[in-house]
Each structure stands twice: as C-alpha cells, then as structure tokens.
C-alpha cells in the first residue's frame, strides 16, 4: 500500500476513534446520564470538540492529504474517495475560523435554552431575536465556507453534499402540486370515523417484546448494537460494531414505538452495513442525512406500513394484544396505520402530509436566510403557509413555528433532507422490487435477508464514495425524483380504499 | 486570582474533562457496550490515552506549573495542593518514555488475555512467562519513576502516594500475628453448623428494590449518579455529579448484592463529596486507593454489618423476604453475615480472613519484584503461604495464585491498599463515634446524614490536599494503624457470641 495513504489512514482512524467517543457520550447523555451530569458532560464534549478541531487543523493531515492527491494513480476508486472526503471534512472545519465556530456553538446552545423556555409560554418576543442572531451567524459561516450558487447551498452542503437550493425548490414545488390534491381525495375516501386504535391500552412490556422481535427479524445485529429508550428516538452509530437505537413507549400508543423501532432500525442497519476494511474512514460513513433517512423510511414505510409485512406479522400482533386487536381485521389495521390527517405537528404527520410540512419549512427558511423574511414576521407567514398547504392553522406558536428545536439549534438546511429521504426510500424500494421479483413474497413470509443484503451491497458498502444523487443514479438509474414516491402512495391507497387514484 | 494559577486551572479542567470522557467509556464498556463493540472501543480508549499523554507532556503545562510554584505565596493551601498534585501527575506521566508506556500497555493487555485463557485450564506454563515479562517491565518503569527506599515503593506510589514498603511490611506482619489466633478462636466459637442463609432463594426484583432503598438512605445522590449491574461490581466517578455504581445479583445470594451496594455506595459518596469549586482539579479527586477503600469498607462493614444498622433494617428485610427470613432472628442473621470461614478466594472472604489473603499477596509480590522468587516457583510458594496463613490449600492454580486478574494486568503494589482501607475504615469510624456520641443511635434509626456529613467534611472535601497517612493524622490523630480494626473485630464478635476476645 502507498505510504502516504497509509499514514493518512492512521490519521483518519484516530479521528474516527475520537468521534466514536463523542458518539457514545452523546448517546449516554440522552439515555443514561443522571440529571445533574449535564455540566460536566458539556465540558467533556467541548474538550473533545477542541481536540477534533486541532486534529483537523494539523498541518500533517494536510500534508498527507496532498501527498495522496499527488500520488493518486496508485489508489483505488474507494481509496480516492477516502482522500477526497477527508479533504472535504478538513476544509469544512478549517475554513470556519475557530472564533466563529466557538461563537456559533455558544449562541446555538443559549438559543436552544431560550427556545425551550419560550416555547411553552409562546414568548415570541424572547425567541425571535435569538433566531435572528443564529441566522446572522449562519450567514457568516456560509460566506466562510463558500457555495455554488447561493449562500443557502453552503448550509445544504452540511447535511446533503451536492444538493442545490434551485434543485430542491423545483423538486419540492412539484411535489406539493401533486400532494395537495391527493390529500383531498384521500380525506374523502377515508371518511370521518374515529381512528381504530384510539382509546386502547397496550402494555409497554408486551410492546417491548414485540419490537425487539421485529428488529431482529429485520436483520439488525444486537451483538453489534442496542435498543434503548429516550424522550426522542434516535440512532447513534458510534462505530459500525456498536450502533445504538432508541425508541419510546407509551401504553396509549402502539404505533409510536413500533414505527420508531422500524425507522431507527433502518438507520441502524445502514450504520452496521459498512465494509470492515474501511472502518475509521469516510468509506465507512453515511453519504448524507437524506440517504440516511431513505434507509429509515424504507423500513418504516415501504416495508413496515405495507400489506405484505402485516400479512405476516398482524396475526402475531393480535395474539400479543388479543383484547385490543382481536376484533380489528387486517384491512382495518392497515387503514389505521396509514390514516392521513392534516395536523399541526410535523413529527406526528402521516406519509402524505409529512412532506407538506417540509415544503413550508424550506420556503420559510430560504426566505429568512435570504433576508426576504424577518423573524418577527415568521409567525404570520407560517400560519398562512399551514392554511394554504394543509388547511389547518395553529392556535399558538408553540404548535406553530416554534414547534421544532431545529431552528433554535441553527439547523438550517436540514429539513429538506427528510423529504429527500422519503422520495429516495420509494425510489430505492422500486429498484429493489425490480431486482428481486420475489421481494414481496419474502416480506409476506417475514424474510428480510435478501432486502437487507441488497441494501448492504447497493447502498451501505459504498460509504461516501458517491454523493446522494450520484448514489441514486448508480442504484436506480435516476437522480432523486418524486414519481416513484407518488406512484407508491397512489398504489397503496388505491388498494386500501378500493379506488383509483 | 493569580493569573498563572488561572491558566493552570483551565489546563487542569480540560484534562479532567477528557478523563471524564474516558471514565464514561470505561463504565459503558462494562455495562452497556454490545459484545462486538470491543475493538472499536479499544481504539477510542487508545486515542484518548494518547491525547492525555500529549496534554501532560505539553511544555505549556510545565510552564504554568513552574509559574505557579514560583508565585506560590499568593496561593491558598488548597491551591498549592492543586499545583503540587498536578505536578506529581505530570511528572509521573512524563518520566516514563512513551515507548515504554506503550510497551507496558500492550503487554498487560496481551497478558490479561493469556491469563483469561490459561486460568480455567490451569495452564501455568502459558501464564508464567507473561507474568515474568510484566514484572520486568514494571521494574523498568520503577527505575524511570524513581523511589524512596526500594523499587517496590515506586509501584506503591501509583496507588498509595507516600506509602513505603518497609512500613507496610511491619504493619501487615503485626496484623497477621493478631489475626491468625483470633481466627482460631472465632472458628471455635461459631461451631460447624450450616450457614443460615444457604440454600434459600431471594428473587432479584425484590433485592433490587431493597438495595436501592439502602443506597438512598446512605445519602448517595441518584440525581448525580446511577446504580447498574455488571459482572464485577465497581464505581466509576467520571465526574462528582455523575458517579456510577454497579452491583451484581444472584437469587441464590442475598448478601453479595447487598454488601456490594453498600461497598460501592461508600465509594460513590466519596466521589460525590468533593468541593464543587475544585471540580476539574486534584482537589476534587480521591487521595489514594487505600483511602477510597476506607470509605467503601466503612459503609459495608462498620455500618452495614453492625447490629445497629440491622436493628433498623432487618424487620424491613424480613418483610421483603418473609418465607426466607421469617424464622431467622436478628442475632442469627448477624451471625450469618459475619460468619468467618478460611477460604481460597479473596473476594469471597470475611472481614477477618480477608487481610490474611492480602498479607500473602504482599509477601509474594515483593519477593517476585525483588527477584527473590521466580514466577515458576510462585505456585508452591502460594500454596505453602495459604496453608500457613489460612490453613487451606488450593487444589489448582485457578483457585490459587491465578485467581485474580491483578497480576496479569500489571497491578503490582495494588493489593496492600485493600488492607489499608480495612484498617482506616475502623480507625475513621472510631473517630466518628468519638466526635458524634449519638452516632450509634442515629444508625439504629436509619439516619445516616450526620455520618455522611462528617465524612464529607473530614475526608472528602480535602481532595488530594493530604496523602493517606497525612489525612489519617489530621482526622484521627494517628497514622494508619491496626489497633482500632482489631478492637472493632473483637468487640463485634464478643457481642455476637457472648464471649470475651
């Protein structure tokens, strides 16, 4: 092996080993840390983040990167991807002066606290100035980072390398044009009855057993990971052989834990799916949030909300909860878990309305970032957008523009990756079906091995070799597009309600 | 505040923040990490250990230390202790060349694996050469570190700063001379009946509830800590506001979890007891292992095996396990939990025989380290020592000289701290009783606040201001001595068996 590359690898493995430590500490903070541990933990995280910044700024890293780039001919495609992506990460870190990075870190930490206090009180006057501050800092950061067409592109680059504002604008606009009328037809078809699962109690202990069974069936390796509980479900892939998922249980809500487990299980299978020879390099890391979300959504929705899946598992679920589900047939259950309902809160939204929430957030945050909208006018713009896209208007900012933590944390450019994930999930599943004619039959018999293997080979083992659209082209023949997602929704709901959409 | 000291403080807080991260990762490794996570974790630990070594070797740390030492007059006693102890830690790290440190780390890691495989097979031929290697490396380390009288002093310094081989030899020799005849008299007094708790089952769920109640009654703050389970109980005080204890449960053994919880609870109360203004400095850190062990033993033994404690808690324990304990009276229970029994395994030993195990280990490891004994002759020396000290002889090395992990890990000089802890616990409790005439009455009513406060003020809040014997002199008026421990044993067993010892 090339000597410069060898020394780069050692550097990389050390960086990833430190990042792993940060990952475990983050997971611990959400799941295990006692209440008073926060202050000490913040110090540890800050100390590690300074170590990481120093490592990225080390001239020896740059020298190794440049030596590899100069001597690139002896490297494989995958090794060249390692060099290119480490260079990208290094440049992103180094381009932002440490003073600005520290100011951003401090401001978003304070701003998040202000949000947490202001939200329940609908205290827009307290929150708005902090939102303005955060946006101003992110604009300065974007100028340091540089961008292709517009400053917002620099934000997108953080979560979805290669994505452009102009491209997303058209994609989301076209998607909205299809979803709004589709939503109307589905509301008509489904009628106004009470949701079938409402008002029933599902003991948490039984839910835990069932969820664990599903997670193992999916192929998540519990010897190289865990399933725990936290206030907000998440996946922490600190290392491909130590991937930790969380879900949350409520005895009032069977679906919340179940679909969180399927969702995080999809993320987890991605994190466990990298090639071991590339552990500790960008070739053993997810492409982007939008590709990550495609993996979680595919298991949650294309698999987990399908008739095929429940043909296999519903009898088992009924046996687990006979009093609650004994008299609800499969079709009734499928309608319940696929029910559409325009609502105020994004995280509770169904597959159809979810993306309309994202469209609005994208419209508003590009306007805020571009200076066309001020924080003080955000509330009315939000309410108007909700009325237009979803036909519902929040009574107060706490369930309106202040509902999500993201903006207070400075996570601008993040929301669109959720919709990219939804679209890519459908597009990838479509290709999987074409590649594996027996896929639906497999799922009906609870056999997910072929699907998991296909995703491993097609998606996971590429690490960061391609960007999001590059990967989609390689696997599906096209960049990310809305058509497979819309076709998937139409087929599902046509079947569920015996109509033609 | 003095500027040099201020900059030293920042350096120190950063070091301790990184050490906290290591602490959480270590805890996680024993309690939460999935089986396949080990390799990645080892890389993270190694990366962090290199970062720590670099920090200690940073010339800026030395400059700050020297500036503080030069300008020492403006510093308080406690601040001077911070400077002195940081200097000690720094020197200890820097004196050992990185290459030797790395060789030791690698050798003990391999040697530990060899031990784990060799022990169940009694494969002394595989283990002995590794033990020789480890000893040779520790000798080289001792030469780098320097020592007061004899190279073994350098080892002691790692765990019990200020302790000397000559001093321990006399202390342990005198102790043995008293314990051997005492053991004989106790064995006569207690007779040969079957232990009262043997053969009974105690459901683990009920044990968990009872243990948690005891831990809270002791004053361990569960908002600044946790109680979990692991194969070997331990305490990880990654930060004074995040202190994690473990215990282990077996439904065959009520006592194991209970006394582990009291023991680790004592360690935990120490870790939670530092002054918050010194967090992130040696003034918020334990003096030594021998002082740490005094805190765990005091709660486990002086409190937890006493008639006063169980006068309060035994009715509650009987209510929790009515079928198992209903017909055993308080006196019978106290005899059961204080039963002496010469046995092969140190960690299962009672208060009297425990120290005889330590005496033997000290005799043997000083001989090994001094070159008077070779690893190949260790087995017979061990067996002869066991016969002499305890009257029992192991059938095989797995329950003989290969029983503990310590030597394979290179932990030479560590065992004596266990006995120092036992002696100091009795000595400190004696002083506590003199300082608080109501102490026994408090304990009989389950009120431990005054004892905890006294330990906080007398021991914990001193951080590393004094060394072990310095602390004992300050609190009790004498260096560590055996008399209070022997008096404590005699009083307890005289009461239990109605005899005069």
Image (tube, coloured by chain):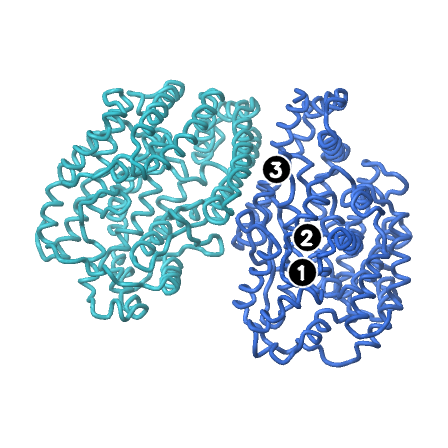
Chain colours: A cyan, B blue
The chain to which mark 1 is attached is B
As drawn, is A486 to the left or to the right of B384?
A: left
Extreme residue toward the front, this view: B437
Question: Would you call the spot at circle 2 few (<14 residues within 10 Å), some (14-19), or many (20 or more)?
Answer: many
| Marks 3 and 2, how far apart at CA | 20 Å
Is there a contact, CB below 8 Å, between mark 3 and mark 2?
A: no
A440 lies above or below A51: below
Residue A195 is labelled as none
The chain to which mark 3 is attached is B
Q: Where residue A423 sits: x, y (%)?
A: 24, 41
As drawn, is A170 to the left or to the right of A107?
A: left
Is disc 3 placed on a helix, strand or loop? helix
Q: Is residue B167 visible?
A: yes
Residue ID for mark 1? B443
| Marks 1 and 2, how far apart at CA | 9 Å
Residue ID for mark 3? B276
Residue at x-position 86% and y-position 45%: B164
Is there a contact, CB below 8 Å, between mark 1 and mark 2?
A: yes
- Please report whichever mark, 3 or 1, sits nearer to the chain's N-terminal start: 3
Residue ID for mark 2? B451
B88 lies above or below B240: above
- 3 and 1 marks on the same chain: yes
Residue at x-position 34% and y-position 51%: A260
Q: Where residue B218 sits: x, y (%)?
A: 62, 56
Question: Would you call the spot at circle 3 few (<14 residues within 10 Å), some (14-19), or many (20 or more)?
Answer: few
Is there a contact, CB below 8 Å, between mark 3 and mark 1?
A: no
């Amino acid at each position: 092996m090339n000597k410069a590359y060898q020394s780069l690898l050692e550097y990389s493995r050390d960086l990833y080993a430190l990042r792993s430590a940060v990952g475990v500490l983050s997971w611990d903070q959400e799941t295990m840390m006692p209440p008073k541990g926060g202050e000490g933990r913040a110090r540890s995280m800050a100390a590690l983040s300074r170590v990481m910044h120093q490592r990225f700024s080390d001239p020896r890293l740059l020298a190794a990167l440049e030596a590899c780039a100069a001597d690139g001919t002896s490297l494989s495609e995958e090794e060249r991807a390692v060099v290119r992506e480490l260079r990208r990460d290094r440049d992103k870190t180094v381009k932002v002066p440490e003073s600005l990075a520290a100011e951003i870190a401090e401001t978003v930490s304070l701003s998040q606290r202000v949000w947490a206090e202001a939200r329940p009180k609908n205290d827009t006057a307290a929150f708005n100035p902090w939102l303005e501050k955060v946006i101003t800092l992110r604009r300065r950061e974007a100028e340091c980072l540089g961008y292709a067409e517009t400053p917002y592109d620099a934000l997108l680059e953080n979560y979805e390398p290669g994505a452009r504002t102009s491209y997303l604008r058209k994609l989301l606009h076209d998607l909205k044009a299809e979803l709004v009328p589709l939503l109307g037809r589905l509301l008509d078809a489904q009628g106004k009855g009470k949701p079938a699962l409402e008002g029933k109690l599902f003991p948490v202990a039984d839910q835990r057993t069932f969820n664990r069974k599903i997670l193992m069936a999916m192929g998540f390796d519990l010897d190289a990971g865990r399933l725990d509980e936290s206030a907000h479900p998440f996946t922490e892939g600190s290392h491909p052989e130590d991937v930790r998922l969380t879900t949350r249980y409520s005895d009032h809500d069977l679906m919340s834990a179940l679909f969180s487990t399927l969702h995080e299980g999809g993320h987890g299978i991605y994190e466990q799916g990298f090639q071991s020879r590339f552990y500790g390099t960008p070739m053993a890391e997810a492409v982007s949030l939008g590709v990550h979300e495609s993996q979680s959504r595919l298991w949650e929705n294309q698999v987990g909300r399908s008739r095929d899946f429940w043909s296999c598992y519903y009898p088992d679920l009924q046996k687990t909860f006979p009093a609650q589900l004994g008299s609800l047939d499969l079709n009734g259950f499928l309608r319940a878990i696929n029910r559409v309902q325009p609502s105020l809160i994004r995280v509770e939204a169904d597959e159809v309305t979810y993306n309309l929430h994202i469209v609005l957030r994208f419209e508003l945050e590009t306007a805020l970032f571009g200076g066309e909208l001020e924080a003080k006018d955000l509330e009315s713009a939000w309410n108007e957008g909700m009325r237009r896209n979803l036909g519902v208007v929040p009574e107060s900012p706490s369930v309106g523009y202040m509902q999500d933590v993201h903006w207070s944390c400075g996570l601008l450019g993040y929301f669109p990756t959720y919709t990219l994930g939804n679209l890519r999930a459908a597009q990838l599943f479509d290709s999987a079906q074409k590649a594996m004619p027996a896929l639906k039959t497999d799922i009906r018999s609870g056999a997910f091995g072929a699907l998991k293997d296909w995703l491993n080979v097609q998606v996971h083992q590429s690490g960061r070799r391609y960007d999001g659209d590059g990967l989609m082209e390689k696997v599906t023949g096209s960049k990310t597009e809305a058509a497979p997602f819309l076709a998937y929704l139409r087929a599902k709901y046509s079947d569920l309600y015996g109509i033609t959409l």
